[in-house]
């Protein structure tokens, strides 16, 4: 991926460099490398290192830990899109005999399966995967800690099961399927299950002394779909573009949007913190900005991928230390710096290429009871309905081709909107999931449920 440092203003580039320099220095990371993506390509790359005269570039591999889960989720969504499975299917339907088969595919993707966070036995991230050759070794005798589907509880074994599901349905090893179906089509030639030179070494930095020691780089075996991958800022920049826009060779824009949509019930603390989880993707609300992506860590490495779809900006940050800089904060800051210093210029407004008079006549003000709403007909072929003041139920609607529209989000997602006409063809009212919208509040003669007082509007006296 070609990165032109001239794509950003000098002040923006300096602010980005300053942010990662502070992160590397204060976090005491042996090295830290970062990239920023805008307009579908990498526009900045930066690195800081403790090695004099050497700076890792966008082709140096780091271990990315749980960002691997997002790759595994893509493989599962591909199976869904091909009709091989349904997200509502219990695991047992496709991968029998695991002892965790009552959890659905969607629950495994969203970490709501109730499975334990970690594998039993010795610390799996610092021991050979050969110690856990079978799924039963990964899950243990009592795999469930919580009722299935009731709460979000992050589970590494859950993604081991998803990797095994991919292998079962594809008839090939997880790594081979990933390479064939995702890495090669997206051009991620520097992403692999095993390290390939040039790659960084993983280090543990002493918490109370400026000294360090190497961390082991174990092959995770069965746990690989949860955290095995090595990658680069260059490759993850490309992956970020895919997660924001989709790529029909791998997953459609609609399917990656589904991955970015909250799918897990939030704990009370999560509501306060503004965090949620989709299908293999983390979601957070930070400083008024919706961010999606994933973080990762394994002994010796930290990783973060952060995307603001609305700003069309993404950041990748990698470091080779077990603990150190808060990379999720750094990634969010890199996105913010670019989004605020060089805000996205919107596309020029253009009118509809052709207008349907029967649709245009619906535009304007409507009332649900005494609540005022506005209906707009937009150039993308949709209509939108939302309150004229304050917050409230709003949605865009997609035409169904038969004079009705289906809600796309919020309270009205999936609900049907139709214009009800009088015998003479004039619009009487809108019916939205049984709610009646009229041109005037409690309009006389309109079929308002419960009727309208015959004396009409009046004062106190």
Image (cartoon, grey):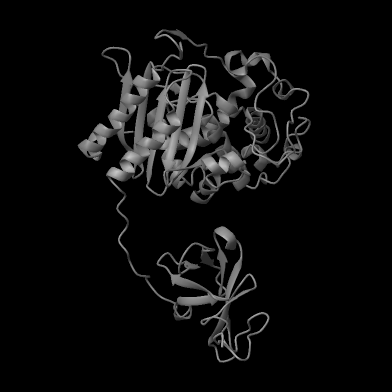
Is residue 7 visible in the rendered image? The answer is yes
Q: Residue at x 25, y 39 (%)?
A: 8
Residue 327 coordinates in the image, percent (x, y): 43, 29
The quarter of the image holding the C terminus is bottom right
Residue 199's place in the image compared with 394, above or below, is above
**Quadrant in which residue 14 is drawn:** top left
**Quadrant in which residue 408 is drawn:** bottom right
98 left or right of 221 in image: right
Q: Which residue occupies the foreground of this view, 227 or 52?
A: 52
Residue 90's place in the image compared with 230, above or below, is below
5 left or right of 423 in image: left
Residue 221 coordinates in the image, percent (x, y): 62, 19
Looking at the rendered structure, the number of numbered marks drawn on it comes to 0
423 left or right of 384 in image: right
Q: Residue at x 56, y 14 (%)?
A: 218
Q: Which residue occupies the foreground of this view, 412 or 312?
A: 412
The quarter of the image holding the N terminus is top left
Residue 378's place in the image compared with 125, above or below, is below
Residue 17 coordinates in the image, percent (x, y): 28, 29
Residue 413 coordinates in the image, percent (x, y): 58, 60
Q: Which residue occupies the foreground of this view, 96 or 170?
A: 96
| Residue farthest front in this picture | 461
Q: Residue at x 52, y 14 (%)?
A: 217
Is residue 59 visible in the rendered image? The answer is no
């Amino acid at each position: 991926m070609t990165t032109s440092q001239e794509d950003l203003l000098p002040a923006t580039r300096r602010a980005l460099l300053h942010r990662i320099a502070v992160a590397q220095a204060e976090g005491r990371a042996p090295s830290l490398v970062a990239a920023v993506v805008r307009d579908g390509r990498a526009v900045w790359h930066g690195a800081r290192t403790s090695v004099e005269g050497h700076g890792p570039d966008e082709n140096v591999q780091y271990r990315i830990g749980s960002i691997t889960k997002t790759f595994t989720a893509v493989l599962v969504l591909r199976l869904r899109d091909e009709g091989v499975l349904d997200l509502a299917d219990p695991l047992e339907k496709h991968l029998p005999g695991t002892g965790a088969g009552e959890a659905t595919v969607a629950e495994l993707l969203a970490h709501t399966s109730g499975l334990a966070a970690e594998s039993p036995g010795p610390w799996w991230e610092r021991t050979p995967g050969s110690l856990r050759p079978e799924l039963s070794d990964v899950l243990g005798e009592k795999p469930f800690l919580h009722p299935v589907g009731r709460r979000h509880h992050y589970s590494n074994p859950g993604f081991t099961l998803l990797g095994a599901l991919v292998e079962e349905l594809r008839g090939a090893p997880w790594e081979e399927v990933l390479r064939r179906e995702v890495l090669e089509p997206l051009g991620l030639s520097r992403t692999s299950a095993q390290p390939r030179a040039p790659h960084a070494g993983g280090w543990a930095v002493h918490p109370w002394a400026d000294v360090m020691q190497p961390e082991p780089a174990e092959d995770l075996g069965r746990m690989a779909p949860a955290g095995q991958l090595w990658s680069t800022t260059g490759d993850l920049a490309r992956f970020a573009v895919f997660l924001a826009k989709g790529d029909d060779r791998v997953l459609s824009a609609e399917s990656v949007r589904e991955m970015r949509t909250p799918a897990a019930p939030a704990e009370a603390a999560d509501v306060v913190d503004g965090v949620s989880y989709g299908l293999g993707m983390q979601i957070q609300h930070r400083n008024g900005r919706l961010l999606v992506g994933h973080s990762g860590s394994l002994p010796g490495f930290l990783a973060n991928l952060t995307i603001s779809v609305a700003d069309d900006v993404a950041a990748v940050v990698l470091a080779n230390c077990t603990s150190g800089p808060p990379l999720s904060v750094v990634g969010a800051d890199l996105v913010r710096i670019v989004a605020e210093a060089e805000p996205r210029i919107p596309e020029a407004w253009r009118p509809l290429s052709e207008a349907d008079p029967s649709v245009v006549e619906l535009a304007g003000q409507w009332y649900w009871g005494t609540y005022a709403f506005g209906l707009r007909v937009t150039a993308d072929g949709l209509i939108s309905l939302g309150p004229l003041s304050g917050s409230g139920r709003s949605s865009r609607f997609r035409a169904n081709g038969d004079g009705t529209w289906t809600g796309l989000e919020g309270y009205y997602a999936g609900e049907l909107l139709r214009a009800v006409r009088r015998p003479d063809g004039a619009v009487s009212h809108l019916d939205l999931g049984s709610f009646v919208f009229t041109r005037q509040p409690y309009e006389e003669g309109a079929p308002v449920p419960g009727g309208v007082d015959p004396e009409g509007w009046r004062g106190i006296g």
